[in-house]
Image (cartoon, rainbow, N blue to C red):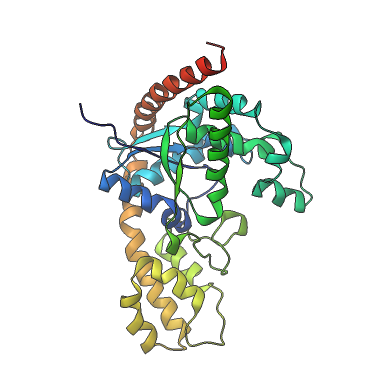
Amino acid sequence: MEKEKPILLSGIKPTGTPHIGNYFGAIKQLVEFQTLGSHQCYIMVADYHALNFVQNAGDMRDLTRELVLTYMAAGLNPEKVVLFKQSDVPAHTELAWIFDTITTMPYLMRAHAYKDAEAKNKEISVGTFNYPMLMAADILLYDTARVPVGQDQKQHIEYARDTAEKFNRIFGEVFTLPEEHIVPEVAIVPGIDGQKMSKSYNNTIPLFATRHEIEELVMSIVTDSSGDRPENVYAIHKLVKSERELEPLYEEHKGKYKALKEALIEDLDAFIAPMRERYHDLNADPRAVTDALEAGGHQARERANRKIEEVRRAIGVS
């Protein structure tokens, strides 16, 4: 009997228009893992996590559909990966509650999102405070071996590992300890203002941007006129071309920021255009998203249900 491949799990919240930061920070690695075939890939639309931010049913449906289309247009094949919605697998929230019972409030108060919200004097929902436990459930429910994350998300994996160790110590060996997978050179993708590319900073380049949008956004990239090379332009440029390819271009156009931005426009558009076309083709198919999610949801539930039954036996409720 063929040995089962280790599980790789990744999830993105459907909270806005996908941008190139999402692609280079996460989706590109998933497509590479799919091609490599070394792991069984579970790709999750984290809609229950998104509920902390999106509280309109129509918006949630639209954003979820857009994210699934994005995954597929970027190269993920629902026949090769398990593409599913978090909300289609009830075991996620059940396991999160079980983890709540062995987790202390001071421990959760160390989470970056909580500390950030507290520092900004925001009103903090229970969902925001507790999200590390739902994330731990997401990861541990599938005996996940590897989780691709950005450098700034490494804490999520630490929470999952801590929780698995604590549960195993109390109830017996049930959970596998996951490892993070970080690609250092794209751990943080820069936005057009030089900060991390993020919807919350309004500094993104949409993944399926039109040529006109690319032109406008690239021309608005913040530059420092003190050097020969516009670093923010270069940081984005080297995502789509190698530094070896860029070296003669930037040498030839030292200090000519407009020419370098125009070169970035050409290269970004050449990179985005094929995905943009696939996105439009998939969007025209009314069954593309529903078929993918139905098949993926069935597979994810099967595996999750086996694990949650093991958990129930361990805690004595089965």
The number of numbered badges drawn on the structure is 0
Q: Is residue 175 above or below residue 65?
A: above
Residue under the image location 59 percent in, 25 percent down: 170
Q: Which residue of the protein is positioned furthest toward the right in this rendering?
A: 121
Quarter residue 67 falls in: top left
Residue under the image location 55 percent in, 44 percent down: 158
Left or right: 289 as drawn, with respect to 168: left
Q: Is residue 113 above or below residue 51?
A: below
Query: In front: 143, or 256?
Result: 143
Residue 283 in sight here:
yes
Query: In front: 198, or 258?
Result: 198
Q: Which residue of the protein is positioned furthest toward the top in this rendering?
A: 318
Left or right: 93 as drawn, with respect to 252: right
Left or right: 79 as drawn, with respect to 16: left
Residue 127 percent coordinates (x, y):
66, 35
Q: Is residue 27 above or below residue 92?
A: below
Residue under the image location 72 percent in, 36 percent down: 105
Image quarter in which the N terminus is found: top left
Residue 106 percent coordinates (x, y):
73, 40
Residue 58 in sight here:
no
Residue 306 percent coordinates (x, y):
42, 20
Residue 243 percent coordinates (x, y):
35, 75
Query: In front: 91, or 209?
Result: 91
Residue under the image location 39 percent in, 24 percent down: 303
